[in-house]
Image: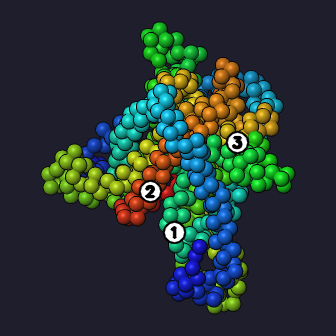
Amino acid sequence: MTAVPARAGWRFRQPSVIPGFGLTLGLSLAYLTLIILIPLSGLAWRSASLGWPQFWTLVTDSRTVNALKISFGTALAAAAVNVVFGTVVAWVLVRYRFPGRRVVDAMVDLPFALPTAVAGIALTTLYAPNGWIGALVGPLGIKVAYTPLGIVVALVFIGLPFVVRTVQPVMEEIDREVEEAAATLGASRFQTITRVLFPGLAPAIVTGFALAFARGVGEYGSVIFIAGNLPNISEIAPLLIIIRLEEYNYPAATAIAAVMLIISFAMLLVINMLQSWSRKRYG
Amino acid sequence: MADPVVFAAQPAASGAGISEQRPARWTLMAVAFIFLGVFLFLPLVLVFMEAFKKGVGFYFSALGERDTLSAIRLTLLVAVISVPLNLVFGVAMAWAIAKYEFKGKAFLTTLVDLPFSVSPVISGLVYVLLFGAQSALGPWLKSHGIEILFAVPGIVLATIFVTFPFVARELIPLMEEQGTKDEEAAISLGANGWQTFWYVTLPNVKWGLLYGVLLCNARAMGEFGAVSVVSGHIRGQTNTMPLHVEILYNDYNATGAFAVASLLAGLALVTLALKSLLEMRYGAEIAATRGH
């Protein structure tokens, strides 16, 4: 600690008088390694040891491809629904004052707090042909439970808070003077919202979309009850992993998991780039 | 619903050019309320209505069943082990990341968030691959009589994996925001590391810590996917409450399933109430990280 050389050489950490660096970093690294790194690298190791030809055969299996399509497709649709309604909900919560606003605001986090299995059986009962909503839309020829539409409904439930909680704080930060300026200069309210407010909100909306989407792709508990789980039609990728595990088909389970992780990380990367682009474009 | 007078009391929102016309306002509110009503309120109400469908007596007898009680016990046990572990290591990690500048810090912070971007099923799968009979460790564990998978240790490990980020990622931004001045002052006045932590840092972050623990606990008790993979679903032994809900539901015992589910929904409501209370009263002392 005493004679720190004056030259700006490579240094692992900046000097600090606060003790405990070694202890806390050591504990953290040990814990992270044991709980997260070793298990995850085990997955990477197992998929790598499959060899490319076997890996490719496993992931191009038609049931696997369909399960991945269903998982990513329904997550995409649900995230799109959430972007629209989540933004409206955030707007209403931020801009309007009404009795019970705090309760409604708190309720938005329900999907975070409610165990997914509970959400799953509740939504299934609600949308089953004899359920409160199922009986209502059934005569219109709309079947929700035990179809891919049911998966979308479950993922809309799961993903809603991601959009609202990402967009809401940014809306709260909007400077009202900007809107006043736009109005003074003759913009209609619609123009103000689409041309002035929306560009500022776009990065947050994209982030909310990405978070809801990422969560939806991996979601299991709330989906399996309502999905019906028909192979190639309403069978999601996480469920197929479990089915393969129960068949002791570890290579297939590993391969599906690896593909899910790779696609998810790639999409998050793309969305991060999109976000920084939109931040640059709209400031 | 909303009273027009409430809007009139809000001069900022009544200016012609900077707020929506009344019809637009009402439409937006109606859309938001109907959406929230259908997607959040109805499912919640339904859980309690279905739970009490066959009367209060049936409700309590469903909860008093032996397998249900053992599921409740196991859920509590898992939370009692995994939440304190994540608390201690979350604090250690936040201290290391927030109080020092070192190479690789950004990478470490990303690692903390990793469990949130992994499907719960994959979180369980990694432990099956690590400890399963087909793994390198499997035969060794078996010959030594150590049970991890399809037993409590596996459930605890999977739960820890899934709930690990809550405490750490609540504390890291909070402690970074508070800087190191207080700690440096305490050290210069002669306090040792532990004293600095107990008397200076901890009081500064206690509400944030509680917030993180609250969310961590809710998830630990409610986790389904990850636990489902490693549990083996042995009734009365390795079934947590969420898994027991699934079993009852698949047994066509919907009322029993909803009775157990109502306990979990109650936990969720208590969590939400405490969370809002903390945000309302100690908002400034809780980092602005909302959303998981």
- Check the residue under mark 3 and report the chain it is in: A
The residue under the point 68% across, 44% down is A124
Residue tagged by mark 3? A226
The reply to whether label 2 and label 3 mark residues of one chain is no
The residue under the point 70% across, 31% down is A240
Residue type at mark 3: give it. Answer: Ile
Residue tagged by mark 2? B273
Mark number for residue A100?
1
Q: Quadrant of residue A233?
A: top right
The Cα–Cα distance between marks 1 and 2, rounded to whole angstroms, is 14 Å
Whole-percent x and y of residue A176?
55, 81
Residue type at mark 1: give it. Answer: Gly
Mark number for residue A238?
none
The reply to whether label 1 and label 2 mark residues of one chain is no
Q: Is A30 situated left or right of A4 in this image?
A: right
- Check the residue under mark 1 and report the chain it is in: A
Q: Residues within 10 Å of mark 2 (few under 14, many from 20)?
A: some
Residue type at mark 2: give it. Answer: Ala
Q: Is A143 situated left or right of B205 in this image?
A: right
Q: Is residue B102 above or below residue B138?
A: below
| Tag 1 secondary structure | loop
The Cα–Cα distance between marks 3 and 1, rounded to whole angstroms, is 31 Å
Q: Residues within 10 Å of mark 3 (few under 14, many from 20)?
A: many
> Between disc 3 and disc 1, whose residue precedes?
1
The residue under the point 38% across, 36% down is B80
